[in-house]
Image: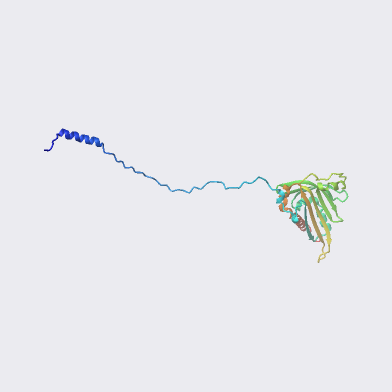
Amino acid sequence: MRPSCSLRQVSRTSRTLLHSQGPAPLRTAWTITTTHRPRHAITPQCAPYTPRRAFGLPSLSSFIPSPNGNSDPKRVLTATRTLPFSPALLFKVISSVESYSQFLPFLTASTVTARDPDSGYPTQAFLTVGYGPLSETFTSRVDCDSAKGIVEARSGAKYGQQGEKAKGGMSGFFPGANEGIFEYLDTKWQLAPLAVDKKGGPQTKVDLEVRFEFKNQLHAAMMSAVEGQMANVMIEAFEKRMRETHSQGQ
């Protein structure tokens, strides 16, 4: 015989089962969205690498080209020309020291300050040398010997002892001994007559010798670019001056 149960019991049993099972779990779907951005190359902003080294400047003398391959700070520059003019005419122009600034390069001013009372030739002059940022005025003793065809201008302490014996009562004082950019500067023009040319015109050999030494290496470095050409440029300028102002053969 099958057992019977009341409706109340069935209802209670159903509630018990539902309670024991609990509420149905909630299912949640998660959607993850990612955005991919293109990568850009990054260029580092860095200063270029420079290796360190001990601070120090080389001697300026290393930048100075040395004439004849030696390291002697004393310079001797020479130039020679044969010109179709008489020695007397050439001497007249060379001894006119006051006109040097009109045609000689590197010389921006020239003023005669003393003359020989007998011959009238200059014995002392103020000369201003200029090149680039350099421009200094110094005093030169001028010697003019028309018989030998020599005109020489000297400046600097090197000639101080000679100044004591010089004419004019200088008595130990030599002009320019403590002035200018040079330890000494000696510019010597010498003329020598040659045989006449094929047309019977006069010819003269002109020798220019420039001796000098700078007082410091800075001046030497600044002038080194042109010092080797100085004598040639000067004698070329002199020749041009002669051809422009005088007719040949005078």
How many marks are shown on the rendered structure? 0
Q: Position of residue 86 (x, y in %)?
A: 83, 59
* Percent position of residue 80, x then y: 78, 59
Pick out the residue farthest to the left: 1
* Residue 112 visible in the picture: no
Is 229 placed above or below 24 here? below
Q: Quadrant of residue 84?
A: bottom right
39 vs 230, nearest the viewer: 39
Q: Nearer the viewer, residue 17 or 191?
A: 17
Describe the colour scheme in one phrase.
rainbow
Specify the quadrant that holds the N terminus.
top left
Residue 107 locus on image (x, y percent): 75, 50
Which residue is at the far front?
Answer: 1
* Quarter containing the C terminus: bottom right
> What residue sits 81% from the left and 55% below the top?
189
The outermost residue toward the bottom is: 198
Most foreground residue, 74 or 191:
74
Percent coordinates x, y for residue 165 in the rendering: 88, 47
Q: Is residue 190 above or below residue 125?
A: below
Query: Does residue 205 show up?
Result: yes
Describe residue 224's horizontal placement relative to residue 174 as left or right: left
Please name whichever residue, 163 or 4, is drawn nearer the observer in this view of the structure: 4
Q: Residue shown at 84%/52% (left/top)?
A: 144
